[in-house]
Image (spheres, grey):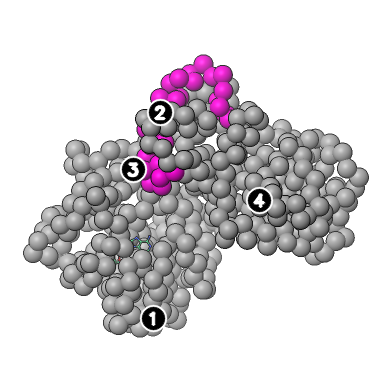
Amino acid sequence: MEVDAETLFNALGKRHEDAYADSPGLVQVTEYVLSKLSRGSHVLDVGCGTGKPVAAALASAGHAVYGIDVAENMVKIAGSQVPGTFSKADMRTYTPPVKMDAVFAVYSLFQISPSDVHKVVYRFAEWLKEDGILVLGVAPSSALTARNGVHDPVWDCVRTEQTWMERPVYELYFSQTAWLNVLREAGFVIELERMFDYIPNDPKHTRLETHYLIVGRKWEPHPLLGPYPLPDGRRGKSMRNESAWGQLQGHLRVTNDERTKLSSVLEVHQRVLDIGGALKDFLGQESARNKLVETLPSALINLLYPDARFEAVIATLILDYIDDLRGFLLEVVRVVNKSSSNARVILIQGAPYNEVHKLMNTMCTPLSGKNAGPAHQGLLLHSASKILAEMGFGRTSLHPLSTSYSFNEDSSSDRSNKLAEMFQNVWFTGEEKYEQMKQQLVFPIENLLHDHPGFIQNDLVIMEAVPDGN
Ligand SMILES: C[S@@+](CC[C@H](N)C(=O)[O-])C[C@H]1O[C@@H](n2cnc3c(N)ncnc32)[C@H](O)[C@@H]1O
């Protein structure tokens, strides 16, 4: 049984620093970043370990250092030897107290799932100021010998089970291209790359390792509208089978924390139009009932309501299936009461790292003869925000929303087959290559269920647009 990061690094403590802190390649890259930062910058070290060498170098140069690590022991050691604010936190759920000038994540991304790697890179981008610097320290899949590991086609990474510092670990290795891609997709330009060999200074762990350091500069102001670069236009028509969609939505789960986030966006609204019918899935029947909600199961080109009827219109995961986005938004804006101080248009689409969309678009869309599958979600939201701004709803904000599709944990061999069919039936029902698609989906679904047993992540983005004057 592999050990998780928290257990592993609580046990290793100082031994890790002794083995790895003397890396000339890492010191050089840290010096390069230091030369780009003005004194007193805010810098975050994600998976800071004992704080040496990175956080220590940043603190010595006069920067305000924040460090997080999932292993309590590492946090204690870092706090005892480096000036800064160190806390025990998981990078997947942490939110920094201020916007950062630089974020370092050095050798701390091996033990989270591929979609979480994508997700945290977008999170790092969100945490940075405009022009902020991201430093990733990783190991490329080319460093692995051909035998150890299984390639995951959805994320272009190799999943391995191996022994590291005498412990069994489950680790992830993206290819060099996949690393560069995820940074660019989250809106970074690549400023520097260094690949070098390193032999840890440890009597029991002397194997040669290849380390890869990448420095990216934040370029796109809205990472959640990615993946970048945005395509010129839509790939083709996206279609969805509404009854299969309804069945999938029956598995939707939202944690109380995430529900609170959504409720706070909607809190102030009295009269809400819910296009897509997702509000009850998100908020639960009970809380949805407290509001004056009218529900339309799908988007109509003419909304059959008088002008200014609602304070808020919320439309969830439907922009893909609308032919005339401008016409639709014109109708939405028409039925919102712009004179209300609570007037809002709320659009919810998939996050750029949404597991279901990535799964479908990698494994099924290329085989489909007639359906483009889920569209580029960032492009849809980007286009919608431009149109809404022209219509006077120019103040937009974006918030991530984590939801999941939950399935019972029965481990029968045909579970992945059933899930493959459930997802396929939403977008690719009746396709000529239906069976081939299904075969291709089974293994990646098993991988996802290995990453998080019992559910598939369904990360979303809420875009809130408010009238200019409000
Ligand atoms: C290989 S060590 C690297 C430490 C330090 N960055 C360095 O370069 O020496 C990886 C560190 O990342 C931490 N880590 C792993 N997964 C994490 C997560 N999900 N959130 C926060 N820290 C994590 C581990 O506890 C460990 O201290």
User: Which residue lies under the disc numbered 3?
Assistant: 157
Looking at the picture, how far across and down is residue 196, in whole percent?
Answer: 22, 56
- Amino acid type assigned to the residue bearing label 1 in the image: Gly
Nearest-to-viewer mark from 4 and 3? 4
Asked if disc 1 and disc 3 are in contact, CB closer than 8 Å, the reply is no
Figure label count? 4
Sooner in the amino-acid sequence: mark 4 or mark 3 = 3
User: 19 or 240: which is nearer to us?
Assistant: 240
Mark 2 and ligand 1: say if the CB distance to the nearest ligand atom is below 8 Å: no
Query: Dot 1, how many residues are within 10 Å of its Cα: few (below 14), some (14-19), or many (20+)?
Result: many
Q: Is residue 400 left or right of residue 35?
A: right
Helix or strand or loop: what does disc 3 sit on?
strand
In three-dimensional space, the C-alpha distance between marks 1 and 2, rounded to whole angstroms, equals: 51 Å
From the viewer's perspective, is residue 96 above or below residue 326?
Answer: below
Considering only order in the chain, which callout, 4 or 1, is on the residue closer to the N terminus?
Answer: 1
Q: Which residue is mark 1?
A: 84
Nearer-the-camera pick, 280 or 371: 280
Q: Quadrant of the C terminus?
A: bottom right
For the residue marked with disc 2, what is the amino acid?
Asp
Residue 8 relative to residue 255: left or right: left
Q: Is residue 404 above or below residue 239?
A: below
- Main secondary structure of the magenta stretch: helix
Determine which residue is flagged by label 4.
Answer: 284
Q: For numbered disc 2, what is the local secondary structure?
A: loop
Answer with mark 2 or mark 4, whichever residue precedes in sequence.
Answer: 4
| Residue 88 on image: x %, y % | 39, 71
**Residue 447 is one of the magenta-drawn residues:** yes
Badge 1 marks a residue whose secondary structure is loop
Q: Write the start and end of the magenta stretch as one range.
A: 425-454
